[in-house]
Amino acid sequence: MGFQTKLIIISLAVSFVISMLVIPILKKLKVGQLERTEGPQSHLKKQGTPTMGGIIIIITILLVGIYAFLKLYLSGNELEKQSIVNLIPLIISSIGFGVIGLIDDLKKLIGKNTEGLKPAYKMLGLLIVSVAFCLYITQFIQIGTDTYIPFFKTYITLPIWLYVPFAVIVMLATTNAVNLTDGIDGLSTSVTTIIFTTLTVIGFMTGVKEITIFGSILIGTCLGFLIFNLHPAKIMMGDTGSLLIGGAIASMALYLKMPLLLIIVALVPVIETLSVMIQVRHFKKTGKRIFKMTPIHHHFELCGWNENKIVSVFSLITLLCCVIGIASI
């Protein structure tokens, strides 16, 4: 517990310092946010705010991850060594998603448009990382295909041919859901920090040390980044950050054998995704909209809620869902 607390503090400090260094560099390079003209008009004033802040998260995870690796691997304790070795695929998969987001962000900035990477190429990249991670944890780490059923407090064992596609879908769905949640200052960072904290607590409850280490690094990293990401944001995380964070959440849930728990603890990203799907389907069918704008956080914006209120309410909902999620174990 003491080491994990230290990791949170170190990650927060490193993230804060790197943010202080990177933000001026991004400003100098004119790596500014591109706002959609069809989005809320209030967001047009954000045009030019440094984006691609996910690189701060990537750098922090790498630096603190290396520190944690050396600290535990050189401890001489075999259990500590195994835990830290198993941490590597969690870090690599998360950064893999972040790299795909980075390519997407660069395409947007270079092309001076909001389209970015072609959806097919983007999905292919996410698919490759997801399949690689799922095969690694089942074939090399051999954590098994047991999947926890919340509230029933039991596991079901899926055949490998069913588990891998299921796990890949979980990873793809989570990354895209978090990506959709990243629409206003501090929303995605706040919501996902609460989710990371919950998964880390579950790691403590179930004795999965690599999850407690990885989660602690992510909690501190996100808190440090959040200082600059709250409204009015000095930096946006971009797809670099949102895809990385989404991938990290999915990776942790799968490693804990609790992907179904995401339906509860990640309810806000789930609702954000459903709002888009419902809106598109209803509009195609009737030519009318159910929401003023999607994802649903934009609907509340157009209803008169300010960004801080949306972040506060959505974070409180996430906190409540996470308490329910922990109670379901």
Image (cartoon, rainbow, N blue to C red):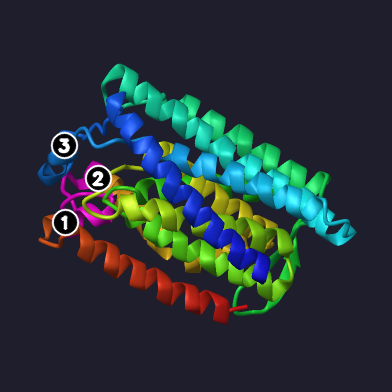
Q: Secondary structure at mark 1?
A: helix
Which of 9 and 319 lies nearest the eye of the viewer?
9
The image shows residue 122 at horizontal and vertical percentages of: 48, 29
Which of 132 and 52 lies nearest the eye of the viewer?
52
Identify residue type, mark 3.
Glu
The image shows residue 302 at horizontal and vertical percentages of: 12, 55
Q: Residue at x 23, y 54 (%)?
A: 231
Report the number of discs. 3
Q: Is residue 261 left or right of residue 293?
A: right
Q: Residue at x 24, y 31 (%)?
A: 34
Q: Secondary structure at mark 2?
A: helix
Which image quadrant for residue 91? top right
- Could you give the CA–CA distance between mark 2 and mark 3, rounded to whole angstroms? 21 Å
Residue extent of the magenta highlight:
282-301
- Residue 297 highlighted magenta (yes or no): yes
Residue that numbered label 2 is attached to? 285
Which of 96 and 139 lies nearest the eye of the viewer?
96
Residue that numbered label 1 is attached to? 301
Identify residue type, mark 2.
Lys
- Could you give the CA–CA distance between mark 3 and mark 1, rounded to whole angstroms? 14 Å
Which is nearer the N-term, disc 2 or disc 1? 2
Residue that numbered label 3 is attached to? 38
Which of 285 and 44 lies nearest the eye of the viewer?
44
